[in-house]
Image (cartoon, rainbow, N blue to C red):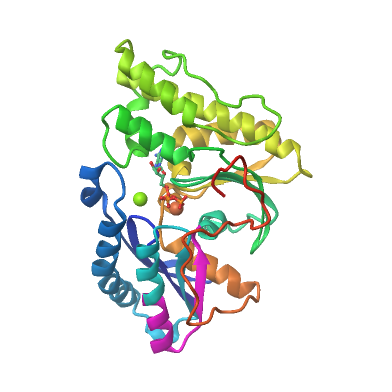
Amino acid sequence: GVVLGIESSCDETAAALVADDRTILAQRIASQDEAHAPYGGVVPEIAARAHAERLAPMIAAVLDDAGVALGDLDAVAATAGPGLIGGVMVGLVSAKALAMAGEVPLLAINHLEGHALSPRLADPDLAFPYALLLVSGGHCQVLLVEGVGRYRRLATTIDDALGEAFDKTAKILGLGFPGGPAVERLAREGDRAAVPLPRPLLGSAEPHFSFAGLKSAVLRAHESGRYAPADIAASFQQAAIDCIVDRLTRALDGIAPVRSLVVAGGVAANASVRASLEGFAEARGLAFSAPPPALCTDNAAMIAWAGHERLAAGMEADPLDVSARPRWPLDPAAEPVRGAGV
Ligand code: ATP
Ligand code: MG
Ligand code: FE
């Protein structure tokens, strides 16, 4: 069967058709980078309006590309949160209308579940359970993925997400928005040992993350005028990687051994981050899996795939009055950490 996926939780408008054999039959994605660039970050009102303008023709296009009719779908799966509520509502309401018109099930998908299961879309051999480092624009967590809908949070950030730290570093260095790819490019030309930067929480007993102090140190280094931007970018990226590896070590020491380490979310598109985690996994005798970069950043194929996973696990469809959720933790049992995000 085929699932239509819809993603609109941040600043990517995306639709995709994915078959249960993992084939991506059709996929369209429109980023809003130019619309938000003048503001240095995503403006919720602008994002919602852009989703509303682009989504319907995009869905028509993917159905047309693949020659699939609405009524032939196994389900319509849309991100129902967490994210910017205006955009989420555009996608979810569209999905409701399509599910009604095609008389097919509606699946309200947690965006983070899309990221968490995306490695299994790319890697058919990746079995549960696996340890997941989820590093995105809004999240930095280590999760034990025990199965579909079964996520145990082992660690989270007490302040900024890792993608946020990349974006803020880019802003400080005047690299524009979005910042992650620009920092990665500039870092290739720099010396990662040139700028002394802190590694927040390194060696601490709790496995949590912190990046706010690193960002402040980047700002001070830049304002000192003593360092080349490329050296700051490279040193920042290395400090962030050192933190990830140390915190991951601590998080994994607290659980029964797993066979696989997986990374997902926008920052997982970063080649240095991937290479370091691969080395870490190898040293610990873990299999390593990371989706191709295009499946790491926001996309609709991962949402369609999460829909397939839910259907295959025998989970029920959602009612047509299901709500959009601005906040929606993957592990509802996880305690807040020092007032941090979930
Ligand atoms: P969330 O998934 O937490 O709701 P989001 O959907 O906005 O947040 P993603 O699209 O998953 O986040 O990831 C975007 C983030 O990934 C941005 O912060 C961006 O800077 C970062 N990012 C993207 N590519 C790279 C890269 N090559 N190197 C580092 N960071 C990157
Ligand atoms: Mg984006
Ligand atoms: Fe995301």
Any part of residue 4 in sight:
yes
Residue farthest top in this picture: 226
- Nearest the viewer among 80 and 249 is 80
Q: Is residue 312 left or right of residue 59?
A: right
Q: Which of these two is toward me, 215 or 28? A: 215
Q: Position of residue 60 (x, y in %)?
A: 29, 76
Above-or-below relation of 255 to 91: above
* Vertical relation: 230 (above or below) 117: above
Task: Give yes or no for residue 96 being in the magenta stretch.
Answer: yes
* Residue at 47 percent of width and 26 percent of height: 214
For this view, does 148 lie left or right of residue 304?
right
Instruction: Report the residue that reaches farthest toward the front.
Output: 339
Q: 101 left or right of 286?
A: left
What is the number of callouts on the image? 0
Q: From which residue to which does the magenta span run?
A: 94-111
189 or 167: nearer the eye? 167
Task: List x then y, in percent, for residue 224.
Answer: 33, 13
- Measuring from the top left, give residue 63's x and y in whole percent: 34, 76
Q: Is residue 163 left or right of residue 225?
A: right
Say if 123 sits above or below 240 in the image: below
Task: Work out whether residue 21 can be spotted.
Answer: no
Residue 186's x, y, as percent?
A: 32, 27
The image quadrant that residue 170 belongs to is top left
Tell me which corner region of the image, top left, top right, bottom left or bottom right, holds residue 69. Answer: bottom left
